Image: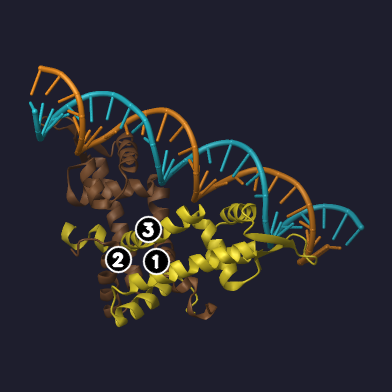
Chain colours: A brown, B yellow, C cyan, D orange
Amino acid sequence: MNPEDFDLGGFLPYLLNQAAEESSLSFQRVYKDRYGMLRTEWRVLFHLGLYGRMTASEIGMRSKMHKTKISRAVSALEDRRFLTRERDTGDRRQEYLELTNAGRAAYDDLREVARKHDAVLVATLSDEEEQTLRTVLRRLAKMDPA
Amino acid sequence: MNPEDFDLGGFLPYLLNQAAEESSLSFQRVYKDRYGMLRTEWRVLFHLGLYGRMTASEIGMRSKMHKTKISRAVSALEDRRFLTRERDTGDRRQEYLELTNAGRAAYDDLREVARKHDAVLVATLSDEEEQTLRTVLRRLAKMDPA
DNA sequence: CGTTAATGGTTGATTTTGTAACCAACAAGC
DNA sequence: GCTTGTTGGTTACAAAATCAACCATTAACG
């Protein structure tokens, strides 16, 4: 009832969103300006770069992105010759996606940017803060506690 | 270089975004289904509900939303008779926005939903975890440490 | 004053996302 | 082997976010 005991800064979904947006600004500029990529596109690129050849629906399960977003991101990356598709001879509905050399180069570059960017963010935190933050975020994101 | 020492689950902007999205799902359903609101709209509503009468650009400074989003959200809320505009007689460029009774009722309702939703999220955390999380998120979000 | 710049806010065009319907390939059960 | 249902993926259309240009008003300053 009292404005004091609830405000936007105290509402976790809002706070998380603000932190997410603020913290991704600098990385966004890189993949946007340097590669003209969208958020969905670098995500697909990273999935293939990190975990190797896989199908679109595997990316969907890991990332929880909707399949239409993935479909479009894959097309865009294919147009830029960052990945190739290969239809499964057993089950001809699905196709395996794999980075080309150009795709891998872009991934390697962006992964380094991401790593450095993460380091900058982490530098504002103490060790316990970082530890707790990562643990808690994984829980909230309902991610596998890898 | 080694895939092991960098993955998406370890990249803070990605992790923050996943947590933000997952944690806001249930609240989103309420403001969408119950009031047909957009994210921008409940945010404007909450700003006015929490902090009272203010101009669009004040909302912009507090929320970091772009002014076109705010402009459209304000129009939508006005159409639903959730707020009124009053032009400043001193500086006739700006106008003060204020919730109507209907707007306040919607705000009161949603604030209760938000509070309860927050409580559910917090219930998955220990006291220290919650404390650390809030502190750190405010820092990352570059919000005033209210 | 009169020109130029800045501010508060809106609008229109374009881009991106979300939703639903869809197609092709396969699976299950009879 | 023919329905019926499911899965992997795409496409068309509607909703929303972004970006640039725009008005109206006020401020700055010669």
Look at the image and tell me whether residue B2 can be seen: no
**Which residue has dot 3 on it?**
B25
Up-down relation of residue A39 to residue B130 (above or below): above
Residue A139's quadrant in the figure? bottom left
Q: Earlier in the sequence, mark 1 or mark 2?
A: 1
The residue tagged with tag 1: helix, strand or loop?
Answer: helix
Task: Pinpoint residue C10: horizontal percent, then vertical percent.
Answer: 67, 50
Mark 2: few/some/many CA within 10 Å (<14, 14-19, 20+): many
> Residue beneath label 1, please?
A16
- Residue B105 falls left or right of residue D12: right
Disc nearest the viewer among 2 and 3: 3
* Residue that lies at the very extreme toward the bottom in this rendered image: B128
Q: CA distance from mark 1 to mark 2?
A: 10 Å
* Element under disc 2: helix
Tell me, yes or no, whether the two marked residues, 1 and 2, touch with CB atoms within 8 Å: yes
Q: Nearer the viewer, residue B79 or A54?
A: B79
For disc 2, the marked residue is: A140
The kind of residue on which mark 1 rests is Leu
Identify the chain of the residue marked 3, using the numbered disc in the image: B
Count of numbered circles in the view:
3
